[in-house]
Amino acid sequence: MGKKKQTQSNRMQTLTLVTVIVLFLGLGVYALVNNLISGNEEEEGLSQEATVDEKVFAYDKQPVLGNEDAPVRIVEFGDYKCPTCKRFADEIYPQLKKDYLDNDKAGFYFINNQFLGEDSITAGIAGEAVYEQDPAAFWKFHETIYEHQGDERETWATPEFLVKLAKQAAPGIDHGELAKAIDKESFKSQVEKDKEIGIQSGVQSVPALFINGKPVPDSLDYEGIKQMIEEELKKAK
């Protein structure tokens, strides 16, 4: 009877030991697989944040403020009806202008990424039309549109309203020609080309910012933007 109990006890101990070993092996395999998955995810994250070939931006065809020959080139993809783009225009752009554009340390480029309705595209067309007439006047018009931005859910960027804004922001251009260009959608192809540039650059939301082809993680984080710019300026020395 004693031997039988001892045998059963030994079996239980052996079973417990095997269970523990299997458990540890399972955890080890899980950890290995998890590390591999995590590593792949990190690699995918890096690839998604890889530097964009700057040729795609077609700098020579975009409005530029500041120094186009500067070692730092900042690109913004935006939509005139986008509330977050207005935040960028109100809170970040003035700081960038003061710290890096007015002193020619950087060049700032705007590329259309209009998607919030037909009048969003109309606003992009108007911007292109103003730029065609007077590149310098574009930036004042650009700022004025954001200053008078309406509700994104409403159709407010009408041809009449945009011409009215142009008369205020760019009094020196031909407003009759501007009205015709908007009515005929003369510059719609340029807006569409800009949209294609955004797709090629991996833009999924606006405002999207790039510094020398590097995507900015948070376009509303001025300190982060400033750090990236300073790093690029150091490289140029």
Image (cartoon, rainbow, N blue to C red):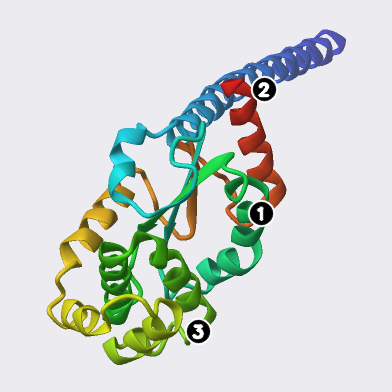
Tell me, yes or no, if residue 221 can be seen here: no
Residue at x 59%, y 59% (from the top left corner): 93
Q: Nearer the viewer, mark 1 or mark 2?
A: 1
Q: Nearer the viewer, mark 3 or mark 2?
A: 3
- The image quadrant of residue 181 is bottom left
Relative to 64, is 113 above or below? below
Residue 214, position as x, y percentages in the image: 49, 36
Going by the numbered disc 3, the residue's amino acid type is His
Relative to 2, is 173 above or below? below
* Distance between the alpha carbons at the discs numbered 1 and 2: 62 Å
Residue at x 38%, y 81% (from the top left corner): 166
Residue 14, position as x, y percentages in the image: 73, 12
Is 93 positioned to the left or the right of 224 in the image? left
Residue 173, position as x, y percentages in the image: 31, 75
Q: Quadrant of the C terminus?
A: top right
Q: Secondary structure at mark 2?
A: helix
Q: Secondary structure at mark 1?
A: helix
Q: Which residue is mark 1?
A: 98
- The image quadrant of residue 111 is bottom left
Q: Which residue is mark 2?
A: 23
Q: Which residue is mark 3?
A: 148
